[in-house]
Amino acid sequence: MAIEGRSDARAGGRIRLGMVGGGEGAFIGAVHRIASRIDGQYDLVAGALSATPEKARRSGEALGLAAGRIYDDYARMATAEAARPDGIEAVAIVTPNHMHAGPAIAFLEAGIHVICDKPLTVSLEEAERMQAAVEKSGRIFALTHNYTGYPLVRRMREMVQGGDLGIIRLVQVEYAQDWLTGPTETTGNKQAEWRVDPKRSGAGGALGDIGTHAFNLADFVTGLELAELSAELTAFGAGRALDDNVQISMRYANGARGALWASQVAPGNENGLMLRVYGTRGGLAWRQENPNQLSWSPLDAPTQILTRGGPGSGEAAARVTRVPPGHPEGYLEGFANIYSEVAAAIKAARDGEKPPAGVVFPTIADGVKGLAFIEAAVQSSKANGQWVKP
């Protein structure tokens, strides 16, 4: 087996990509750029990388963008690129949460596909406005919940859908970090500053940042409808207006029960995303920090460890796997899988066709569902854990 980009996603020519946000000093912008390049699917050709003109120019020049395609205003970029015969086909929006809706709607109205970082935006009302814009435009909208791109997460979903676990009874998901245990936002850490600011982050702190990842992962794998939740949101950090620890009990429409814990004040945890799902015929457990192994426990049989690319890893995982077993794939490749799935959809749309079989990625519907989850959790917590329907 050769080590190469995914062979099922390269046909049809590269997609001309633009970016809003992600200028110098921005972590997630660099992640998106790397992800877009891994499979050779996109060419970054334009950007409004910062609202500060000097920073936008420096950032664009550092990335090798042509001077005429470095913008300091996303609206001007949308208009100008839509008018060019070689204008961008898709745009990646990698700004803080409060700056997702404006650019997304502007580019959709200009006829340009959108790839947006999560969470979708800062309120359910705004999320629904974005959904209306997507539906009116007819363009593709992808939300980069990157953990859905991991091969063994795809295998979990495949096993649940195939009935291997039987009827799902229990869903346990957690996402623990420690980087906000101290007053990180007062040390000049740009990432911390906007995440604890309600004006830029929205109603959820850890809830919006990593709680939505945990919720989306459980939703993607199980496909269960969340009926109601009971939440306790806590801000342990002195003076914080937003939560840094989240504990949520969940009731699903099929009768299953779930629990979600998300924390950024748990010392010793770097990026501890974990999902466990249990049904009448067996259980699955997966950890993001060891993403190339999946624990499968059939009822009344020994637990098995499935490996990415190994025996029993399944077709859904195989189609998003790049390298032979034993060579780790992880965070960047998960992002790249989302980008390549979107590329397959865009290239199919060029020809007026549906995406190839098996192509899946989070959409605007997942984003709206995530905002409904956030607002229900905030409402429940304010009401001392009252059960709330999202």
Image (cartoon, rainbow, N blue to C red):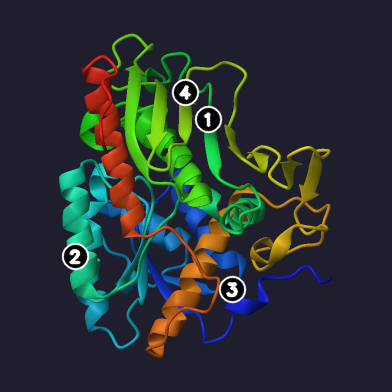
> Can residue 120 be seen from the camera position used here?
no
Residue under pointer 3: 40
SS at mark 3 in the image: loop
Mark 3 in CB contact with mark 4 (< 8 angstroms): no
Mark 1 in CB contact with mark 3 (< 8 angstroms): no
Residue 53: horizontal and vertical position, in percent? 26, 54
Q: Dot 4: few (<14), some (14–19), or many (≥20) neighbours within 10 Å?
A: many
Q: Nearer the viewer, residue 243 or 94?
A: 243
Residue at 68% across / 44% down in the picture? Answer: 291
| First in residue order: circle 3 vs circle 4 | 3
Is label 1 or label 3 in front?
1
Mark 2 in CB contact with mark 3 (< 8 angstroms): no
Quarter occupied by residue 58: bottom left
Tell me the kind of residue under disc 2. Answer: Ala
Residue 111: horizontal and vertical position, in percent? 24, 76
SS at mark 2 in the image: helix
Residue under pointer 1: 174
Is label 3 or label 4 in front?
4
| First in residue order: circle 2 vs circle 3 | 3
SS at mark 4 in the image: strand
Measured Cα–Cα span from mark 1 to mark 3: 33 Å
Measured Cα–Cα span from mark 2 to mark 4: 33 Å
Residue at 56% across / 57% down in the picture? Answer: 161
| First in residue order: circle 1 vs circle 3 | 3
Measured Cα–Cα span from mark 1 to mark 4: 8 Å
Relative side of 218 to 240, left or right? right
Which quarter of the figure is the C terminus placed in? Answer: top left
Measured Cα–Cα span from mark 3 to mark 4: 36 Å
Tell me the kind of residue under disc 3. Answer: Gly
Residue under pointer 2: 133
Tell me the kind of residue under disc 4. Answer: Ser
